[in-house]
Amino acid sequence: MNQASHSAYCTTREAARLLGISLRTAQLWVENGQLEAWKTEGGHRRISRASVQRLLDGTVLQRPAESNAQHQALDRLKILVVEDDHILLKLYKTVLSSWNLPIDIVTANNGVEGLILIGRDAPDLMITDLAMPGMDGFQLIRSLASSTLRAGMEIVVVSGLDAEDIAAKGGLPKDVRLFPKPVPFEQLRAIVVAMLEHRAAYL
């Protein structure tokens, strides 16, 4: 392989560093096709830098101010909302922030952004839509199914799709809660409060 072709690829560890995610998450993205890769004769993965750049170029990350702190309070709940409707996403942030609960809210516009944020700092609760451009909610949830990042994460789906549409796309795991739109904020608040109470009991 000449130098030009060699520079077009990087190691899994380097790709993880460039994307700001864990090594395991980078491996997961290779397995599900989010990152283009091939194996050397020695069995080492080489990842296309172009596929890494596509993820970087297509993602605008939003983080809560607390995420830059070295030691985030253990009793705070991290919530990720994945929704492609910008108006609805703003409503989520406004309503959840008005609860005055010890929560940190981060948002993503699609499944790819969601995976990047999860790889950087896995949330305690993910609230996601299903019908989204690019990687939709079904793909996002399936990508997490075999990942260690899924452990301990509550997943709630809020979708405008009916039961037949969801079943036609393969359905959802049994431990994923499903609510129809409009967003049931009272039920979501009850879930968050229950999670906080459960956490408090073990601190």
Image (tube, grey):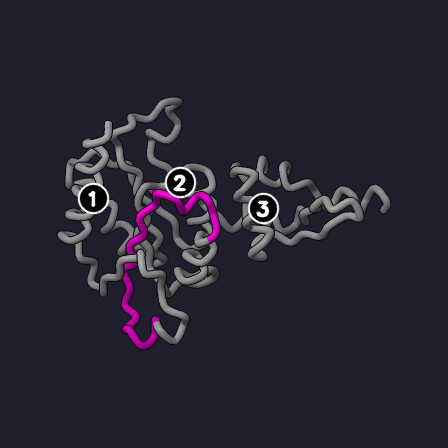
57 on left or right of 185? right
Where does label 1 land, which residue?
A: 192
The amino acid pointed to by label 3 is Gln
Instruction: Report x, y in % for residue 94.
Output: 21, 45
Where does label 2 land, which residue?
A: 122
The residue lying at 32 percent from left, 41 percent from top is: 124
Work out whether 173 lies above or below 94: below
Magenta stretch, residue numbers: 146-166
Of helix, strand and loop, which one carries label 3? helix
The amino acid pointed to by label 2 is Ala
Front residue of 57/193: it is 193
Q: Would you call the spot at circle 3 few (<14 residues within 10 Å), some (14-19), or many (20 or more)?
A: many
Determine contact: label 1, label 3, CB under 8 Å: no
Front residue of 93/72: it is 72
The residue lying at 43 percent from left, 56 percent from top is: 140
Q: Which mark is residue 93?
A: none
The residue lying at 52 percent from left, 37 percent from top is: 22
